[in-house]
Image (tube, coloured by chain):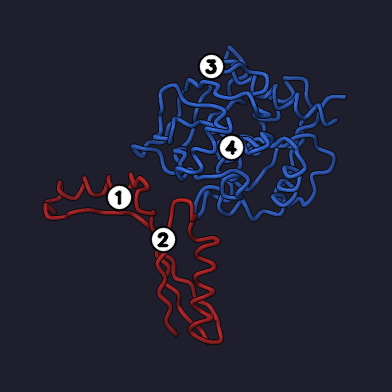
Chain colours: A red, B blue
């Protein structure tokens, strides 16, 4: 079965996020005065084959932890759904 | 017989010839090692030079860590062989877990290319054994992701074990504890963001990098 894993990689709480802070400062200049905060990260779409949902989630968690994110500074949020 | 230093070339590495010339100017031998090689042969030391290995895709060093040569570099390091990662090489060593922590984008998000003043904090490493604690060195930096970070337990270990080998006098990038370079527990693996191979001649602004690379060469020579 083929699944789509959407992996969002973001900085761990407490890790400085100069990119998010810069975007956050830029938005009021465009008139978006009500923006409370911005954090920057990146997203990946990974198509993978697995026997079932649990196996797909396990594989996605493993590849996110071992490559897509650097656990020293980043964490990932994963959503897996059948294609 | 003088020691031979291997200078590893990944796709996107761009400081390898500077490193070779620096080693040769100190009387050592240097040989380029392609990233696809699986053996280091009879090398006595290794430099992972600066650049943009594998385009810095994903994160600096994240893909380089999987290059075939890195298994050989890990084994060489585990056997006590001297390994120094400069700039992108430092990022690769962190991603490969040969050194703790990670290098983040600079505070202020500026690409920094300028001289920096380093203070030698520890001489218990293959890169600083010939220097003196407190010695100030002018060595250029050239990086976007050079802000060193780690958890507080790791930082305490680094400080307690004398593994912070170089600190910035004026922190340019937001590195935790002004860290410019660190070593592993044995002191034979060192990573630093500044470029000692670009500080080898007064004519080019500074010759202060020589004491660092001479230390590496001396450590490598001890293995010949």
Q: Which residue is mark 3?
A: B134
Name the residue nearer the viewer: A20 or B184: B184
Q: Secondary structure at mark 3?
A: loop
Q: Position of residue A39 (x, y in %)?
A: 30, 54
Label 4 or label 3, whichever comes before in sequence order: 4
Which residue is depicted at the point 74% across and 26% down? B217
Q: Nearer the viewer, mark 4 or mark 1?
A: 1
Which residue is depicted at the point 82% across and 31% down? B223
- CA–CA distance between discs 4 and 3? 26 Å
Q: Which mark is residue A20?
A: 1
Quadrant location of the C terminus of chain A in the rendered image:
bottom left
Q: Which residue is mark 2?
A: A9
- CA–CA distance between discs 1 and 3? 37 Å
Mark 2 crowdedness (10 Å alpha carbons): few <14, some 14-19, many ≥20: many
- CA–CA distance between discs 4 and 1? 27 Å
Q: Nearer the viewer, mark 1 or mark 3?
A: 3
Q: Which residue is mark 4?
A: B50
For disc 4, the chain is: B
Q: Position of residue B142 (x, y in %)?
A: 49, 32
Above or below residue A41? Residue B101 is: above
């Amino acid at each position: 079965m083929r699944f789509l894993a959407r992996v969002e990689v973001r900085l761990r709480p407490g890790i400085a996020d100069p990119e998010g802070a810069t975007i956050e400062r830029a938005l009021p200049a465009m008139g978006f005065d009500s923006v409370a905060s911005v954090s920057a990260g990146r997203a990946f779409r990974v198509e993978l084959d697995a026997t079932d949902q649990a196996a797909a989630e396990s594989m996605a968690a493993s590849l996110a932890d071992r490559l897509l994110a650097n656990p020293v500074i980043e964490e990932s949020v994963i959503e897996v759904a059948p294609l | 017989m003088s020691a031979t230093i291997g200078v590893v070339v990944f796709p996107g590495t761009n400081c390898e010839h500077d490193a070779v010339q620096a080693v040769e100017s100190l009387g050592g031998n240097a040989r380029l090692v392609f990233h696809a090689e699986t053996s280091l042969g009879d090398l006595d030391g290794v430099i992972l030079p600066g650049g943009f290995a594998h385009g810095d895709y994903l994160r600096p060093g994240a893909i380089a860590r999987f290059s075939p040569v890195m298994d050989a570099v890990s084994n060489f390091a585990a056997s006590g062989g001297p390994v120094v990662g400069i700039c992108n090489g430092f990022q690769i060593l962190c991603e490969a877990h040969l050194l703790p922590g990670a290098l983040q984008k600079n505070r202020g998000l500026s690409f920094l290319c300028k001289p920096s003043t380093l203070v030698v904090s520890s001489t218990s490493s293959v890169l600083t054994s010939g220097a003196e604690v407190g010695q100030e060195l002018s060595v250029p930096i050239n990086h976007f992701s050079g802000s060193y970070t780690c958890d507080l337990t790791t930082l305490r270990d680094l400080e307690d074990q004398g593994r912070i080998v170089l600190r910035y006098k004026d922190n340019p990038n937001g590195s935790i504890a002004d860290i410019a370079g660190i070593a592993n527990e044995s002191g034979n693996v060192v990573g630093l963001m500044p470029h000692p191979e670009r500080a080898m001649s007064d004519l080019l602004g500074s010759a202060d990098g020589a004491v660092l690379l001479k230390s590496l060469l001396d450590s490598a020579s001890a293995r010949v």
